Image: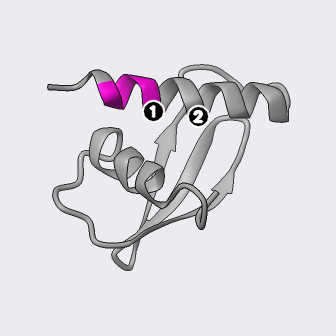
Amino acid sequence: MNKDHKDAVISYAIHYGELQNPIEATMLAISPLSMRLAVDGIEIEIPFDHRLVDSVDAHKTLVAMIGEVAKRP
């Protein structure tokens, strides 16, 4: 996720983590309830809108979340 989708991880930090102008963001972990990111040396947790049931659900949820980011003005 981190190498292939660097821009997506930064977008999660901006949109869902409400951070301004992050330089570096890395996904540290995904649990059924949230994702944990390291953003410019601090850790943040972004909750999901539902409990993830498996890896397919996690993938679909992360893709949907990026879709929401793309809708922002």
Task: Reply above or below: 21 against 71.
Answer: below
Q: Are marks 2 and 1 in contact (CB under 8 Å)?
A: yes
Q: Is 29 or 8 nearer to us in this picture?
A: 8
37 relative to 68 in the view: left or right: right
Q: Is residue 35 above or below residue 36?
A: above
How would you classify the magenta stretch by its main secondary structure?
helix
Q: How is the image coloured?
A: one colour
Q: Secondary structure at mark 2?
A: helix
Question: Which residue carries the number 2 mark?
Answer: 62
Q: Which residue is mark 1?
A: 66
* Image coords of residue 55 (percent x, y): 83, 35
Compare residues 3 and 14 and report the one nearer the observer.
Answer: 3
What crowding class fits label 2: few (fewer than 14 Cα within 10 Å), some (14-19), or many (20 or more)? some
Which residue type carries mark 2? Leu
* Whole-percent x, y for residue 34 in the image: 59, 41
Q: Position of residue 60 (x, y in %)?
A: 67, 25
User: Pointer 1: residues within 10 angstroms few (<14), some, or many (20+)?
Assistant: some
The range drawn in magenta is 66-70
The residue at the point 28 percent across, 72 percent down is: 23
Does residue 54 appear left or right of residue 29 in this picture?
A: right
In the rendered image, residue 24, in percent from the top left (x then y), is placed at 37, 72
**Would you say residue 73 sits in the magenta stretch?**
no
